[in-house]
Amino acid sequence: MAGGLLLSGAVAALLTTAIPASSSSPVFDDPPPDKIVIDVATVNGSGCPQGTAAVAVSPDNTAFTVTYSNYLAQAGGNSDPTAFRKNCQLNLVVHVPQGFTYAVASADYRGFLSLQPGASGTQKASYYFQGSSNTAAKSHPFSGPYNDDWQATDSTDWAQLVWAPCGVLRNFNINTELRVSAGSTPSKVSFMTMDSTDGDISTVYHFAWKHCPGS
């Protein structure tokens, strides 16, 4: 999906983990009132073919969401041998007011999971800025038997947040992955989707904000 989403008004800070009292750059309650623009540069991957993923921003401007319609990994039975792993990489350009920087403080994922006894599934996500070696990665494993909705949350401690570089525009990359193994029941299909049974929004990314040094 290409194009920009123009946001105006105050952007409320949101961080789900505790912040040390001694932090020199805390998340604040008086965020920048200027415009925030998110451009979706590219959406690529076997789990998000063209036209099957969309990005939008929440009404209160504290988060952005990604909706998938064809993000499915499966193994066992007559499954395609390459279908056990699916991925989707979002390449985003986030324009923020001068003097501020941002990080993704937490991400909420959900979908549906059907695992036979002995089968397993994994959801993984990596977060990094273009040109930076600092990458945050989280994994969530599941074991069969399982036949229900699944949910996972990535939360990052304040000190470990990967902040956008101040004063330069760097694309922000989020690479997600679903992986399924048939395990001890290869004759039966096991699968994992990144969505929900009713097709509602499946992934929410929450922002944290702070002042750049010298601003």
Image (tube, grey):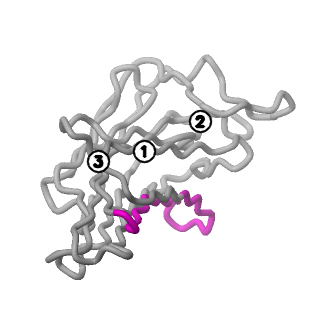
CB within 8 Å, label 1 to label 3: no
Q: Which amino acid does label 1 sit on?
A: Val
Question: Which residue is pictured at 59% across the width and 43% down the height?
Answer: 155
Counting residues from the N terminus, which is met first, the one under dot 1 or under dot 3? 1
CB within 8 Å, label 1 to label 2: no
Question: Which residue is pictured at 64% across the width and 47% down the height?
Answer: 161
- Label 1's element? strand
Counting residues from the N terminus, which is met first, the one under dot 1 or under dot 2? 1
In the rendered view, does 214 fall on the left or right side of 72? right
Q: Mark 2 points at which residue?
A: 100
Question: Which residue is pictured at 26% across the width and 41% down the height?
Answer: 196
- Residue 154 point in image, percent of width and height: 54, 46
Q: Mark 1 points at which residue?
A: 94
Q: Residues within 10 Å of mark 3 (few under 14, many from 20)?
A: some
Q: Mark 3 points at which residue?
A: 112
Q: Which amino acid does label 3 sit on?
A: Phe
Which image quadrant for residue 49?
bottom left
